[in-house]
Image: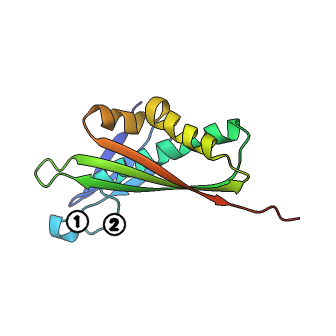
Amino acid sequence: MEVRVNWVEDVMFVAESETGHSVVLDGAPESGGRNMGMRPMELMALSVGSCSSYDVVTILRKARQQITSCEAKVTAQRADAIPAVFKSIHLRFRIAGKNLSEKQVERAIELSAEKYCSASIMLKNAGVEVTHNFEIVSVEATG
């Protein structure tokens, strides 16, 4: 994998992936930025949430679960000292669908956490406490 990060001005950068997608990063005004983009640590939290969500949705669809939505709320706690690394990350999944199996949802989240989500497993291996829980929302069939 190869990505590029180009400095724009002050503390603003544009990051570009090898697949041609871009994201703006910027700092808060008190840090010399103009708040025009995400912070690097926000991107890391988003990476964990999106990586795990990808796994959960894919696993549930392969299990023929009738999933209609998946939301992951990521809450991260950082150290008070520099470097302000993540101490803990919690993912709260809200999964909606018709006749979803609680056992299948729980298993999908476990598989992501223990086997598939490179982002969360990498942070976990670095000493970050990564936890998960979930809520299932039933969607009735319309006919």
In this view, 27 is above or below 122:
below
In this view, 64 is above or below 67:
above
Q: Residue furthest right?
A: 143
Residue 96: percent from the left, percent from the top?
Answer: 64, 57
Task: Determine contact: label 1, label 2, CB under 8 Å.
Answer: yes
Label 1 belongs to which residue? 33
Position of residue 139 in the picture relative to residue 76 (left or right): right
Is residue 13 at all visible to an observer of this figure? no
Quarter holding the N terminus is: top left
Quarter holding the C terminus is: bottom right
Q: Residue at x 49, y 31 (%)?
A: 116
Find the distance from the CA under tag 1 to the CA under tag 2.
8 Å
Q: How is the image coloured?
A: rainbow
Label 2 belongs to which residue? 36
Q: Residue at x 72, y 61 (%)?
A: 139
Residues 36 and 92: in front is 92
Residue 63: percent from the left, percent from the top?
Answer: 69, 36
Q: Image quarter for residue 54?
A: top right
Q: Amino acid at mark 2?
A: Met
Residue 102: percent from the left, percent from the top?
Answer: 62, 47
Mark 1 surroundings: few (<14), some (14-19) or many (≥20) residues within 10 A: some
Task: Say what secondary structure mark 1 lies in.
Answer: loop
Q: Amino acid at mark 1?
A: Gly
Residue 39: percent from the left, percent from the top?
Answer: 30, 57
Task: Say what secondary structure mark 2 lies in.
Answer: loop
